[in-house]
Image: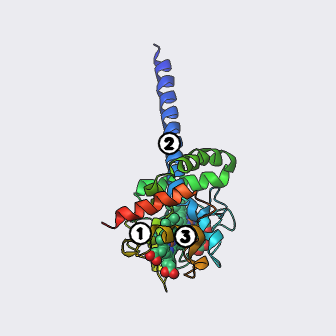
């Protein structure tokens, strides 16, 4: 091979490898977003997440409308620190204790991608949100993606939203004395419908009966 060809080959390899790394980072960002962020920011980043739609007076969570964090540094900062920054609303959790710097960097890249090339970013995201719908049958997955934010990973009532939601705080599910039937009802209908706090959202439109039963069974395993 001629020397010049070798250079071209090396340049080509460098170029393609840096491109695939970038695509990999975006895809990883999309996957983490589908796991951790859709509940508030929505499947499309439009702020149409389940929590804002169900909780009255919830701040707007669209990632498109009047964005404050626009460059990578600002995005990494708001995702890492959330409410710990004075100007950020109390409902944005800080993620630095749960996610690695690399994961937060991937998320920041994905949010930028979502804003700049929305159509392609949504195609990438949809692969992951659809996967989530399929696995959501598993009670643990449902619990971790939909309930842990308030009730905590182990159901102890110590999720990150517990700092904000008080009087009453999210219940310690390991101490619940509800029967499986009563538990199914509050999960399906929400707190308000059963004479409890409206801060416990109704999940009935969003989960099948089988899924509600799966999550009730999973909560039972948290008790021992
Ligand atoms: C419990 C709900 C909740 C979750 C979960 C959540 N956010 Fe937020 N987020 C908010 C709220 C509320 C705001 C608005 C804060 C404000 O305007 O002061 C916000 C703001 C932001 C902003 C700033 C938007 C801007 O430019 O003004 C970014 C970026 C962001 N969130 C990314 C994420 C990412 C990435 C995740 C997942 C790792 C995530 N959020 C998970 C509630 C949430
Ligand atoms: C936005 C926060 C929030 C989310 C998300 C949430 N909950 Fe709750 N939940 C609450 C609050 C607050 C209460 C306390 C209601 C009361 O005592 O009036 C509660 C109460 C409950 C109770 C009643 C326990 C008892 O013994 O009284 C059950 C069961 C429950 N939640 C299950 C779930 C399940 C399952 C999910 C996920 C599918 C979920 N919750 C998601 C906030 C939340």
Q: Which residue is mark 2?
A: 24
Q: CA distance from mark 3 to mark 1?
A: 20 Å
Q: Label 3, label 2: how many angstroms apart (C-alpha)?
A: 42 Å
Q: Secondary structure at mark 2?
A: helix
Depth check, front residue: 44 or 100: 44
Q: Nearer the viewer, residue 142 or 196?
A: 196
Crowding near the residue tagged with mark 3, few <14, some 14–19, many ≥20 C-alpha atoms within 10 Å? some
Can I make out residue 209 in this image?
yes
Q: Looking at the rendering, in which quadrant would you find the C terminus? A: bottom left
Residue 198, horizontal then vertical, whole percent: 58, 79
Answer with left or right where residue 140 lies relative to residue 87.
left
- Judged from this view, the residue extending furthest toward the top is 1
* Crowd class of label 2 (few under 14; some 14 to 19; many from 20; radius 10 Å): few
Q: Residue at x 49, y 23 (%)?
A: 9
Select label 3 or label 1 by which is in front.
3
In the picture, the disc for residue 185 is: 3
């Amino acid at each position: 091979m001629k020397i010049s060809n070798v250079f071209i080959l090396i340049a080509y390899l460098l170029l393609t490898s840096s491109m695939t790394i970038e695509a990999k980072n975006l895809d990883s960002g999309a996957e983490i977003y589908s796991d951790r962020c859709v509940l508030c920011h929505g499947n499309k980043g439009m702020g149409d997440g389940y929590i804002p739609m169900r909780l009255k007076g919830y701040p707007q969570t669209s990632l498109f409308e009047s964005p404050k964090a626009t460059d990578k540094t600002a995005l990494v900062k708001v995702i890492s620190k959330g409410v710990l920054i004075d100007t950020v609303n109390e409902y944005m959790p800080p993620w630095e204790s749960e996610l690695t710097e690399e994961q937060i960097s991937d998320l920041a890249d994905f949010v930028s991608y979502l804003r700049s090339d929305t159509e392609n970013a949504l195609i990438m995201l949809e692969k992951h949100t659809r996967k989530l719908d399929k696995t959501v049958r598993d009670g643990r997955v449902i619990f971790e993606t939909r309930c842990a934010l308030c009730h905590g990973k182990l159901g102890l009532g110590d999720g990150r939203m517990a700092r904000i939601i008080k009087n009453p705080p999210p219940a310690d599910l390991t101490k619940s004395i509800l029967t499986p039937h009563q538990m199914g009802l509050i999960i399906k209908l929400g707190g308000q419908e059963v004479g409890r706090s409206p801060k416990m959202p109704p999940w009935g439109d969003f989960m099948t009966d089988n899924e509600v039963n799966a999550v009730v069974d999973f909560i039972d395993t948290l008790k021992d």
